[in-house]
Image (cartoon, coloured by chain):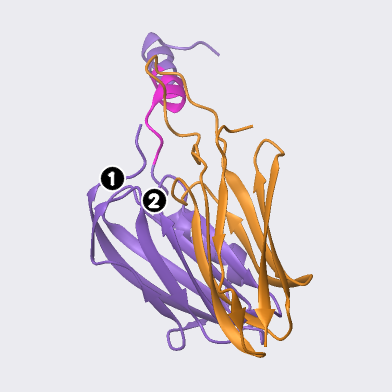
Chain colours: A orange, B purple
């Protein structure tokens, strides 16, 4: 497991029904591409987040397939429609099998 | 079959290059292959997709990219000048508010970034933008 993996998400605290809200996510992760070499010339094995998903009350918002071309500490911003009070579930899948999750609640008036 | 000394040395060098050489950059053929795998060779329109990328990126390690394709089911990002052309693919679900996404990507050097959107009706749209990179982002 990569060290110091901290997911961070930002969603508005409240919104009106039917609004499209902006969601920002960041996870601290080295995203080792597998192409770099250490000081002795040995390849450093690949370890990246290979998939990220976001769902709102179980309904899919976005599902991202990720390759090594995405930067260290992968950042994603997108929009989601909220029709009712509920929570966003965020999931990051690591190459080593680890799964990192985070949730964020939103109140819909 | 006998092998000449010259052949032997040549083969050895080729094998050594394959093992120890720098990561090779994706060729135009690899880009075409990735596009073919995504679109199945369908024609691509140019309207209805916006790719926002900086003209000059100072640091190739984190280049901010934004894509917007109203109504798209999925958007694929490609960078042909990287060791691997694939960057990421966004698949939008029913709760997506708009069909835009922004992220930060790595670029090995000056190159064209390609975005291809798959529409629900099976058609495809693409946008390309050239990005100049001051410091390459693939280390090594």
Residue where numbered disc 1 is placed: B136
Q: Is residue B18 above or below residue A26?
A: above
Q: Please tell me whether the stretch drawn in magenta is mainly helix, strand or loop.
A: helix
Dot 1 falls on a residue whose secondary structure is loop
Is residue A107 rendered to the left or right of residue B116? right
Q: Quadrant of the C terminus of chain A?
A: bottom right
Q: Which residue is mark 2?
A: B106
Residue at x-position 71% and y-position 86%: A83
Horizontal relation, residue B136 to residue A98: left or right: left
**Apparent side of residue B30 relative to residue A14 in the rendered image (left or right):** left
Residue reaching furthest right?
A58
Q: Residue A39: x and y, percent?
A: 37, 17
Q: Is residue A94 above or below residue B133?
A: above
Point 57% across, 36% down: residue: A47
Q: CA distance from mark 2 to mark 1?
A: 8 Å
Write down the region rendered in magenta: B13-24
Residue at image x 32%, y 70%? B129
Depth order, front residue of A99/B84: A99
Chain under callout 2: B
């Amino acid at each position: 497991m990569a060290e110091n993996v901290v997911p961070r998400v930002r969603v508005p605290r409240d919104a009106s029904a039917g609004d499209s809200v902006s969601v920002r996510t960041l996870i601290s992760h080295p995203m080792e591409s597998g192409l770099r070499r250490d000081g002795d010339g040995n390849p450093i094995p690949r370890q990246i987040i290979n998939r990220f998903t976001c769902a709102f009350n179980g309904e899919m918002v976005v599902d991202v397939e990720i390759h090594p071309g995405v930067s260290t500490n992968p950042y994603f911003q997108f929009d989601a429609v909220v029709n009712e009070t509920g929570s966003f579930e965020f999931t990051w899948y690591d190459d080593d099998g680890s799964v990192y999750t985070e949730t964020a609640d939103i109140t819909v008036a | 079959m006998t092998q000449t000394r010259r052949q032997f040395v040549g083969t050895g060098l080729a094998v050594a290059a394959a093992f120890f050489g720098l990561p090779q950059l994706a060729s135009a053929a690899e880009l075409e292959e990735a596009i073919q795998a995504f679109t199945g060779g369908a024609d691509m329109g140019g309207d209805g997709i916006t790719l926002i990328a900086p003209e000059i990126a100072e640091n190739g390690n984190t280049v901010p990219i934004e894509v917007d394709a109203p109504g798209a089911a999925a958007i694929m990002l490609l960078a042909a000048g990287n060791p691997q052309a694939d960057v990421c693919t966004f698949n939008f679900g029913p709760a997506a508010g708009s069909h835009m996404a922004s992220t930060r990507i790595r670029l090995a050097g000056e190159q064209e970034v390609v975005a291809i959107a798959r529409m629900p009706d099976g058609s495809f749209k693409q946008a390309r933008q050239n990005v100049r990179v001051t410091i390459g982002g693939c280390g090594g």
